Amino acid sequence: MKSRKQKQPKRHLGKQRKVKARPGVSAPANQRTKTRRRRLPADPSDPREKALELMKLGVSETEAAQTYRIGRKRLARYRTQNTTSKWKGRKWRIVDRRPANMLIASRGKITAITVPFRSKGKVGRYWNAVNQFLEDNNPSHLKLFSNSGIRDADRKLHPWETDPNTLRKLDSIGELKFVDIYSNVAQ
């Protein structure tokens, strides 16, 4: 005699209703929209950011928090939310992958833009090429950047300034002081 599988009755869970999210409360997982969270660059005047810079130099988390009069746990939470960090040896290894505010020369003027982490090296290579051009007046250093540009964090394209005359003009009026450019990036 063959055994038959008996059908299990389906449980009725009732009608599922959609719940509207209240202000300040996140919506249920099935109603969340898939939006990309935009990461903001670091605020250099924030005491948590200043304490994080001290930690990058090798100061302990407790000392850095005490220096800027913030709680150690608050600094630890800020560090974990904004960076990738590891305690290695006797100091923190902190990698900051947030967007950065940087200066570029575009369309005949110096422009401050917010670039994603992966584009920071490209901006540095551009400024090195401009600096080499200004030292030896050889426009071949700028060929790599002609007919191209960089996209900022909002995906807007900013073309590189590669015209030798325009770069010389910016240099003569003092716009291309590399100490100022790099100090702006470091802030």
Image (cartoon, rainbow, N blue to C red):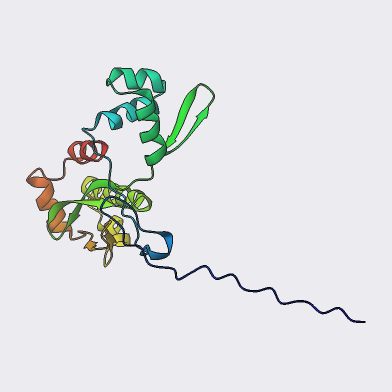
In the figure, 187 relative to 123: above or below?
Answer: above
Whole-percent x and y of residue 133? 24, 51
Left or right: residue 32 versus residue 115 is right
Nearest the viewer among 149 and 83 is 83
**Figure check: 154 above or below 174:** below
| For residue 25, above or below residue 19 | above
Number of callouts in the render?
0
Q: Report if residue 131 is visible in the image.
A: no
Is 148 in front, or is 158? 158
Residue at the (37%, 62%) spot, across then down: 32
Q: Is residue 39 left or right of residue 30?
A: left
**Identity of the residue furthest to the bottom in this view:** 1
Image coordinates for residue 38, horizontal then vertical, percent: 31, 54
Residue 11: percent from the left, percent from the top?
59, 70
Above or below, 27 relative to 9: above
Q: In which image quadrant can residue 42 be found?
A: top left
Query: x and y percent of residue 2 in the render?
Result: 89, 81
**Residue that protrudes farthest toward the right in the picture:** 1
In which quadrant of the rendered image does the C terminus lie?
top left
Q: Residue at x 38, y 52 (%)?
A: 118
The residue sitting at 23% across, 45% down in the picture is 135
Q: In the displayed structure, does residue 30 sit left or right of residue 65? A: right
Q: Nearer the viewer, residue 5 or 82?
A: 5
Work out which quarter of the rendered image holds the N terminus and state it.
Answer: bottom right
Query: Can the viewer see residue 97?
Result: yes
Residue pictured at 20% horizontal, 41% vertical? 181
Find the residue positioned furthest to the left.
173
